Amino acid sequence: MQLRDALDDYKRTIGHATRFPGERRTVTGRFSGGEGRLVHVDDDGELRDFGYPLTGRTGLVRSRLGLAVGDDVTWLDQVDTRQRYVDDTTLIETVHEADAATVTRHDATVGDAHLTRAAIEVGEDGHANVDPERLSLVAYARFAPDGRDDRVGQLRYGDAVEMYHDAEHDFLASATGFSELRGQLPATFPELLADAPTDLPRARDGDRYEEERLSGEVVVDVPLENGVATVASLLTDRTETTREAARARLDELFETLDSVDALAAAASETTPSVPESAPARESLVADLRVLSLLSAESGLRIAGPDFDPFYATSGGYGYTWFRDDAEISTFLLDADGRLGLGLDDWHARSAAMYVGTQRPDGSWPHRVWPRDGALAPGWANARIEDGPDVDYQADQTGSVIAYLAQARATGVEVAGLDGALVAALAGLDETLAADGRPVVCQNAWEDSAGRFAHTAATFLEAYSELALHGAGLDADALDGGDDADALGADLDAAALPDDLVGHARDQAVRVYEALDDLWVPERGCYALRETPEGAIDDRLDSSTLSLASAHRSFDALAESDSPGEAGAVDDERVDRLVSHVETVVDGLAHESDEISGLIRYEGDGWRQAGQLSEKVWTVSTAWGANACAELAALLDARDDPRADRLAERARELLAHVSPGGSLCEPTSYLPEQFFDDGTPDSATPLGWPHAIRLATVALLEDRERLAAAPVPSED
C-alpha cells in the first residue's frame, strides 16, 4: 500500500460507521500463497500483494480485471461475483457474472509467482448476444518495486512487461501475449488534493507518453485462446534472478500450469494435508491453511496481513511478535502430538529461528521481520535501549521458553537449543521480582504497564516446562568467551545454580504461590494486574485465561516427581481456577443479534468507532474455549464432576469461532474483531485464534470431549 492508496481510501471511507480511513482491508476475499508471497484476492476480484514482511518484495499494490467487448470494457469488480477455495488448497475460484459472459477465474500463488486463469463463457441464458471473437481480458496493474511508486521504470516485451526501481524487478506476462500495452500515470498532485477519490485506470493521455513508462502502472489487453486467458506476475530480486531466468520461469509456469487441475495440484503443495478421518476436519484445514499463508520460509509468521502499514489506527500487523508466534508454535506442537498432522518441519524451523533471534541477555525483542529475524519497528524494546525496562513485554520471553522446552522434549533438534534455554532461564530470573511475580512491564495487549496476571502465567508455564523437560541443561552452555554479542554475554552464568531443573522447579513454586497476591475474593477471580503505583486492577481480562494452561503445566510437576500421585495444584487453587475461568468467560460474554463471543477486557475502547461498547474478539473467545478445555482436563485428572460443565462451556465457545459460528467468516477466516452488527474488523485472518482453535479441537478430541456425552435414557 502506497500513500496514494491510503489517501484514496481516506476519501472513500471518511465518516463510515465501521471503516477506519486510510487502510487496506482484508475482511472480504481470500488469500493465496503459502511459500512466501501472499496475494489477496478480494471478493470483487482485485489482487494485491501482502507479502513484503515475508519476502522483502512489495509487488502488486493495486489491480483490476475487465472484460472487453471490442472497445467497451466492463470492470469485473462491478458485476455480481461469488468466490470459494477449491477443496483444501489455496487455489481460489472467483466467478464474475457479466452481461456479456461468465468469467470463471482461478488464482494460485506458486512461490514468487501468481497466476490468474480466466475462462470466459458466452451464450448462456442472461448473457447478451456477443461474438466470442470480440472478447478479450483487460488487466490494470500497479507494481511498487522496492516499495516505491516514484522513480520506477518499465521494460516492455511482446508477452511481458518488467517494472523496476533498483533491486526488485516485477514482471507481468500473459500466456497469449498482449494485443495492447500502455502505461498509466499514478494519481497526480491535483487529484490527491481534490476532495473526490480518483478512479483508475484512466483513458490514455497522448501528451504524456514518456511519463507512462516511468511508473509501475500498466493496462494490458490479453487475447483469448479457446476462451481462456492466463496472466501471471513474478516478483524477483535482480541480485538473485536474471531477467532471462525470470522470463523463462514465466514461460515454464504457463506451460506446466495450463489447466485448473494443474493449478490445484500446485496450490495443494503449500499446505499440510489433513486426514479425512480427522475430527472437525473443515476447521483443521482452514487453520493450517491460514498458518501456512502467514508463514515466511524461515518459519516465523506475521500476526496477520498488514491492513494498516501507515499506522493510521494501529501499530501494524505484518511483523512477528514472539508472544503470538511462540503461542502458535506451542499450539501446533500440541495439536500435532494429538492428531498426527506431520508438522515436524514447522516445529524445527520455529525452534531454529527462536534460537537465532535471542538476544545476549536471554530475552527476545518486541518484534522482528519474519523473513530473516531482523529487528522490526516497535515500541517495547526497553532491554535494547538505555533506561528502565518498563517498555518490555516479558511474557514474550516466557512464551518462547515454554515452546522451546516442549519442542526439546518431543525430539526437535536445533543447534544451540540448550544454550538458548539456559540463557532464557537466566533472563527470566532477572525479570522476576523478590515477591515471586514478574516486574512492571507491558501487557499482552500492549496498551498498559503493570504486573500482570497473564505475564505471571507465562512465567509459571515457562518455569514448569523447563523443570519438566530441562534434564541435561548446563550453565556452561552460556560461555561465549569475549564476544560481547554472544549468547549469555549480558548474563552472569555463575549466578545460576548447578541444578538448573531444580532451580526452575523452585521458581515455578515461587510464582505459583505469589499468584495469591492477585486473588480478588469479592469478584471470585484473579486481578488483571497490579498497577505501577501498587493498586489492584480487578477488571476482567481474557488474557488471564492463560492461567488454566499454566496450572496444567505446573500440575504435571507432581506426576514427574511421583508418578500416580495427585497433581501439584492444591485443592484451594483448583477451586479458585474454576471460579476465575467461569467468572471471566461469563463476565466478558457479549451477544448481539448478529454475533456472540467474548470481549477482550472490561473497558476496552479500542477501534469502537461509533459503537458504545467493547467489541468481541476472536482470540478472546477462542482463548475462553481453550481455558475451559484445559481446566476440564485438570478436573478430569481429579475425577472432579465440574469437568463436565467446563467441557460444555468449551464446546459452546468453540462453536462461536468454528465454521458456521457467528465469528467465523464464510471465507473460513477468523478476523481479529467484530462490531455488534456483525461487521468484521482489523487483521483478517489473524493467526493466533486459528492456532488456539486447532489446539482446542485436538485437546477436546483427545479427552473424548469434543462431542457432548449422550443423555442417558430414562428407560
Image: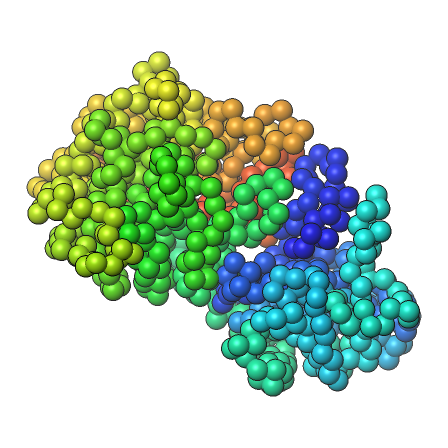
Give the color scheme: rainbow, by chain, secondary structure or one colour: rainbow
Which quadrant holds residue 389? top left
Residue 222 visible, this angle: yes
Q: Residue at x 55, y 61 (%)?
A: 51
Q: Residue at x 53, y 77 (%)?
A: 239
**In the picture provided, is 645 more to the left or to the right than 16?**
left
Q: Is 13 or 635 nearer to us in this picture? A: 13
Q: Where's the C terminus, which quadrant?
A: top left
- Horizontal and vertical percent for residue 494? 12, 46
Q: Where's the N terminus, which quadrant?
A: bottom right
- Horizontal and vertical percent for residue 174? 71, 78
> Is 539 drawn above or below residue 369 in the view shown?
above
> Is 426 drawn above or below residue 254 in the view shown?
above
Q: Residue at x 47, y 41 (%)?
A: 379
**In the picture provided, is 78 more to the left or to the right than 560?**
right
- Horizontal and vertical percent for residue 310? 62, 47
Residue 276 visible, this angle: no
**In the picture provided, is 596 more to the left or to the right than 139?**
left
**In the picture provided, is 196 more to the left or to the right than 471?**
right
- Horizontal and vertical percent for residue 8? 75, 49
Count of numbered labels shown in the rendering: 0
Q: Is 377 or 522 nearer to us in this picture? A: 377
Q: Residue furthest top?
A: 522
Q: Residue at x 61, y 31 (%)?
A: 608
